[in-house]
Image (cartoon, grey):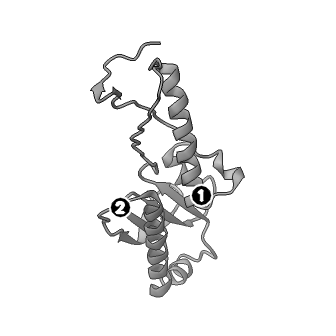
Amino acid sequence: MSLFSLFQSPEKNDRVVLLLDIGSISVGVAIVHLAPDKNPSILWSVREIMPVESKPGYLRLLSLTRGSINAALEKLEKEKVLRPILSALKIKELDKIICFLSSPFCVSSTRNIQLSYSEPLELNQKFLSEILGSEEENLLAEISTGLNVQNAAKSRFELVERKIMRAAVNGREVITLYE
């Protein structure tokens, strides 16, 4: 389904939809009129800017996003624009609520892992993969716990990228990791 197909009406009737545009720094809400063979027209809109945090985090971002959505929808309710728009267009109710995520919602984590061993060991890709696998599980558990996610929803989290930024032994950087 393309973005524009959301606005194409198979019906011959006028429709009104509510759009939510959720971005990483703001939330927009708009009432849009869709009429056959016409371009969509924005009848009302508001955008709530999220405050910039000195120490951002995924839990805080989620909280700020929820707050901005609530503030924007409260403005819609307070200004009492929906009923008059629907009445003027002779439309009984909203046809749809369409939500756009304008920016990716992701969590980035950099971990500094320090290990000590009394006996020599071979630093290779397999060893690092085991350590990173453990750290990934810890990160996903931390996110799930912080967001109060139930077990069924945990499968929706997905690791997108794993990158070893630096590896050092006794303070000396390891340039090549051998298999």
Q: As drawn, is 52 to the left or to the right of 97?
A: left
Q: Which mark is residue 145?
A: 1
Q: Compare residues 171 and 95 and report the one nearer the observer.
A: 171
Image coordinates for residue 141, horizontal then vertical, percent: 59, 50
User: Callout 1, which amino acid?
Assistant: Thr
Identify the residue shown where x is 54% and y is 57%. Answer: 36
Residue 8 at least partly seen = no
Q: Is residue 176 placed above or below 129 in the rendered structure?
A: above
Mark 2: secondary structure: loop
Q: Compare residues 31 and 179 and report the one nearer the observer.
A: 179
Q: Compare residues 105 and 176 and report the one nearer the observer.
A: 176
Front label number (1 vs 2): 1
User: Callout 2, which amino acid?
Assistant: Ile
Residue 173 at least partly seen = yes
Mark 1: secondary structure: helix
Image coordinates for residue 14, horizontal then vertical, percent: 57, 65
> Which quadrant does the N terminus fall into?
top right
Q: Residue furthest right?
A: 152
Q: Residue furthest front?
A: 118
Locate residue 174: give its quadrant: top left
Q: Is residue 114 placed above or below 149 in the rendered structure?
A: above
Q: Is residue 38 placed above or below 18 in the rendered structure?
A: above
Q: Residue furthest top?
A: 179
Q: Which mark is residue 25?
A: 2
